[in-house]
Image (spheres, rainbow, N blue to C red):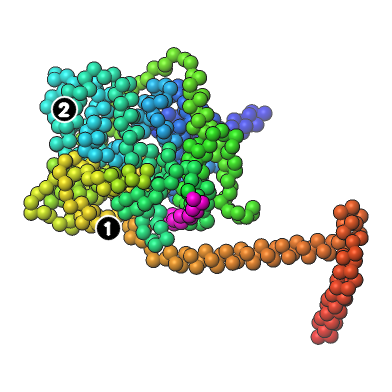
Amino acid sequence: MLSRLMSGSSRSLEREYSCTVRLLDDSEYTCTIQRDAKGQYLFDLLCHHLNLLEKDYFGIRFVDPDKQRHWLEFTKSVVKQLRSQPPFTMCFRVKFYPADPAALKEEITRYLVFLQIKRDLYHGRLLCKTSDAALLAAYILQAEIGDYDPGKHPEGYSSKFQFFPKHSEKLEKKIAEIHKTELSGQTPATSELNFLRKAQTLETYGVDPHPCKDVSGNAAFLAFTPFGFVVLQGNKRVHFIKWNEVTKLKFEGKTFYLYVSQKEEKKIILTYFAPTPEACKHLWKCGIENQAFYKLEKSSQVRTVSSSNLFFKGSRFRYSGRVAKEVMESSAKIKREPPEIHRAGMVPSRSCPSITHGPRLSSVPRTRRRAVHISIMEGLESLRDSAHSTPVRSSSHGDTFLPHVRSSRADSNERVAVIADEAYSPADSVLPTPVAEHSLELMLLSRQINGATCSIEEEKESEASTPTAAEVEALGGELRALCQGHGGPEEEQVNKFVLSVLRLLLVTMGLLFVLLLLLIILTESDLDIAFFRDIRQTPEFEQFHYQYFCPLRRWFACKIRSVVSLLIDT
């Protein structure tokens, strides 16, 4: 009896798994879940811990053993989705950026979105001009340390904090000046709200780029925003498609298709190639969810989507959750006392090493520093005329790009770079925020920089330790191979055509087999079913049976007897 109880208790312990979820303020929430616990259960635990009601904008992200990012599906088992050994590590992040973050009902929700956008700013996913960068950083400073106090904040106090991958002394002084003179008296909630209002106006708000290649083998980045689908290529946005113009999203293997229907019945199909089939499927699922969330009026309109036109081929996926309009309507009905918010100070982050002591650009040699300035965010003016991921890691935030810019030409007349108004280059997203206000010949040197390794700063979300040098070198080699392009778009097209022909042949043979089986049942069986009886009594079927089928059957029977007798004789 005792042994049974012990064995039962050991089995129950084996069915429990420890989960650690890293929150937006870099704190950790640890809990235990059952083997069959769904993603919704874990998400509800987190939201209860955070006292969060407007939870539809958020999600849980994890990285599988193959380093592919995923969003946890709430309708499926957590353990089966992770496919890794416990204990499990995941991250709580903003999944759907609100179209108007200032319109969020509760301060706790705005604070969490503020933390996410602050991370985007640091990791280079949110790009901006120098003046905007200084204002955003000043809002962060005001929200987290309060009003300027000469006794507490000595000269150069802003240099102790790092809001971008890298910055210069000039930007530090600009941030401190705004903080001292313009933001005095603002509460943390007010500063965070102003930060959100400013970030919302930037072209790359809510962009989480997925690296791909177009049909010509050129590197491209696909992203989904609250307003539509975006393709960034080279140094410009080549496509911006509103959600109501997207008619279909499809993928086959590593190939991603976007079907677009624009004005005057103009229909186009955009084709891109992801690094792996898993990355392509993740891209497709993100697109399906974003389109459903932002485009539909009601969650009852959500339909199961298939990646293929054939019922037995491809993947099927259905977005499970409310849509943006329903979320806003539900938020308006919230009536409770505002929950207490425990704001975190500016402390080092696991995903932001040396965040409080990061080097300034002034520590980089002059010629190299100039190339660094030039290579980044060359502005966003060209984006205005037309208007989340696969992990791509670098070994550090500050130094990985420096070897790639050593070959940049030094100008005899030293000039400071500007966040020029040209185009957003996702390949430069890991690079520091430029900080000067003068013009430069950006296009020439940007071509040199764009020849270097493409890198989108990705947080180390599923790993507790920093990757080793060997792992970093291996990842860098894979990334270089991806960004240098493969000469096989034509080969992929040929392979795709061959596979399509084979599928057509298989489908045709299957249909013929089914028809033959049905014909045999009609002619040879004695099934007395009304459907079969009615068919047998038609004059056409009787004529076919006696004039064609019976002679064909006798011919086959004769041939089979001949073959059998030949085999017996031999």
Residue placed furthest toward the left: 412
> In the rendering, which numbered label is found on residue 143?
none
Tell how many labels.
2
Mark 2 or 1, nearer chain start: 2
Q: Within 10 angstroms of label 1, few (less than 14), some, or many (20 or more) residues?
A: some
Q: Is the residue marked by circle 2 packed among few (<14), some (14-19), or many (20+) residues within 10 Å?
A: some
Outermost residue on the bottom side: it is 570
The circle drawn on residue 177 is 2
Q: From the top left corner, tell me how far across and down residue 397 is, in percent.
A: 27, 43
The span shown in magenta is: 264-275
Helix, strand or loop under label 2: helix
Instruction: Name which residue lies at 15% across and 44% down.
Output: 438
Q: Is 271 included in the stretch rendered in magenta?
A: yes
Measured as percent of width and height from the top left, residue 497 is found at 53, 66
Q: Say if 152 sits above or below 204 in the image.
A: above
Q: Residue 237 placed where, x, y %?
A: 35, 49
Residue drawn 40% across and 47% down?
A: 240
**Residue under the point 52% across and 33% down:** 323
Q: Is residue 518 left or right of residue 20?
A: right
Q: Is residue 397 left or right of residue 223?
A: left
Q: Is residue 469 shown in magenta?
A: no
Q: Is residue 476 above or below residue 70?
A: below
Residue 288 placement, left or right of 375? right
For the residues labelled 2 and 1, the Cα–Cα distance comes to 37 Å
Q: Which residue is mark 1?
A: 451
What residue is drawn where x is 45% and y is 24%? 52
Picture layout, residue 561 above or below residue 514: below
Pointers 2 and 1 in contact (C-beta within 8 Å)? no
Judged by depth in the image, the label closer to the viewer, 2 or 1, is 2
